[in-house]
Structures are given as C-alpha cells and as structure tokens.
Amino acid sequence: MSTASVRDRAKERAGAVTVLLTIVGYGAVGGVFLVPQFQALFPTLTKGTVDLLAHGIAAVNTVTVVTLSLGWYWIRNGEVKKHAAAMTTSFVLILLFLGMYLPKVAGGGTKEFVLDSSYAWVPLWDWVYPAYLVMLAIHIILSVVSVPVVLYAIVLGLTHTEEELRNETPHRRVGRIAASAWILSLALGVVTYLLLNHLYDSTFAAAEAAAVLLPALPV
C-alpha cells in the first residue's frame, strides 16, 4: 500500500484514527501501572537509572514547550511551514518522552515529595506541599484529557493541505485548545520535576511496590 493511499484513508477517517491512537496511548500508559504482564516486558531499573530518565524526560518536555510555543508564534504570523515543522517536532519529542516514561515507571518506580531540603535557602512553608500536589494534579489531568485533542490536531495537520485545514476542518480551533493544554501540562510537569528532584527531598518506591499501592503518577 502506497504512502499516499495510507494518507488518504487516514484523511477520510481522521476521527477513527484519533480514537485508535488514543486507545493505544491510554493502554500503554495504563498498562505500566495496572497490568503486571505489561510491566514485565520492561527491565528492572536502578534508582540511578530512574533519576537519569527523570532528567531526560524533563529536558525533553522543556524543549517541547519551546517548540510548541514557536509553532504557536509562527502560525500567528502566517509562517505555515515553520509552524508545521515545529508541531511535527513536538510530536516526535512526545514519542521520545513515552520511550523514556514507560520503562521508567514499569521497571523503576516512583518518588514521593518530602517537605525538606538540602538547601538552607529553600523555604519549607506549609503550603508548598499542597501547591506541589495541585500542580501535579493539573499536570496529570491535562496530560490525560488533552491526548485525543492533541492527536486529532496532529492527524488533521498531517493528512490535509493548508487550504483544507483552514476551510474544511476545525484544525485551527482544535489546535489552539491542544497547544494550550499541552504547553501548560508540560510546563507544570517541569516545575514539579524541579521541586521533586532538585529543590526538595523525596522518598523512592520501587516498581514492585508501585504496582501494588498504585501511588500518584510520577512526573
């Protein structure tokens, strides 16, 4: 089957393709938390490797915030090709994120925030931990609910011409919602990563315990 044929079929069934990709995405992430057989597909990781993956994920998410912001800026200035390149790059970066996130959770474990710090200048105010939880909750919720919107915008963008996107699809409206949720989710993820991994202390729960206790999603 030719590439053009695949693109035409995806174009005709953009909604169905979005649903399929969403199910695959939810299934992969849900599997590393809830399905022991799926978790077993990943190697057991040391805490050092988990920390390294966390740093890599934060770096990827930071770059993605930049590429998404550039894509938004370029489309507002009518630079369609630059916008398309930025958004395609952002999607590739999210796939890279998943390539690190899934093994980190399945084979590594999770960290829990501790209101203590190795740095004397870091405040230990009582509201810091609740604020961390609120940001983490918003990050997780946006990460979950934005998946189909982001995927729909991407599928439309990859299968339609510029003229079709402007006149025949809701790409502009959907893309605006997707980019807003995506940027905010990633930015909050980076902030909570800094709090959990650098500014404050934490405890570590190995993957075996995580599979039983089902703690909050890690950043």
Image (tube, rainbow, N blue to C red):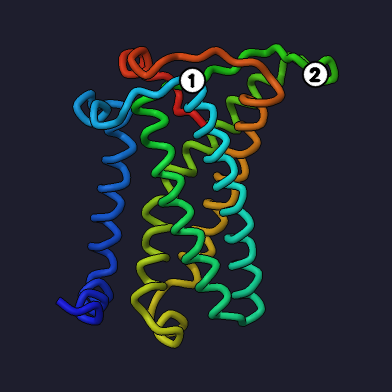
How many residues crowd mark 2 within 10 Å: few (<14), some (14–19), many (20+)? few
The residue nearer to you, when weighing 77 against 116, is: 116
| In contact (CB < 8 Å): disc 1 and disc 2 | no
| Amino acid of disc 1 | Lys
Q: Residue at x 42, y 46 (%)?
A: 145
Which percent across, then down, holds residue 37?
A: 19, 27
- Label 2 belongs to which residue? 123
* Left or right position of 181 against 156: right
* Left or right position of 115 against 103: right
Q: Nearer the viewer, mark 1 or mark 2?
A: 1
Residue 16 position by quadrant: bottom left
The residue nearer to you, when weighing 137 against 56, is: 56
The span from disc 1 to disc 2 (Cα, nearest Å) is: 26 Å
How many residues crowd mark 1 within 10 Å: few (<14), some (14–19), many (20+)? some
Please tell me how many numbered marks the rendered image carries.
2
74 vs 140: above or below:
below
Which percent across, then down, holds residue 21?
A: 28, 55
Secondary element at tag 2: loop
Mark 1 or mark 2, earlier in chain = 1
The residue nearer to you, when weighing 85 against 155, is: 85
| Amino acid of disc 2 | Pro
* Left or right position of 48 against 27: right
Most extreme residue toward the bottom is 163
Secondary element at tag 1: helix
- Label 1 belongs to which residue? 47
- The quadrant of the picture occupied by the N terminus is bottom left
Q: Residue at x 50, y 63 (%)?
A: 89
Which percent across, then down, holds residue 69?
A: 63, 61
Most extreme residue toward the right is 121
* Left or right position of 81 against 117: left
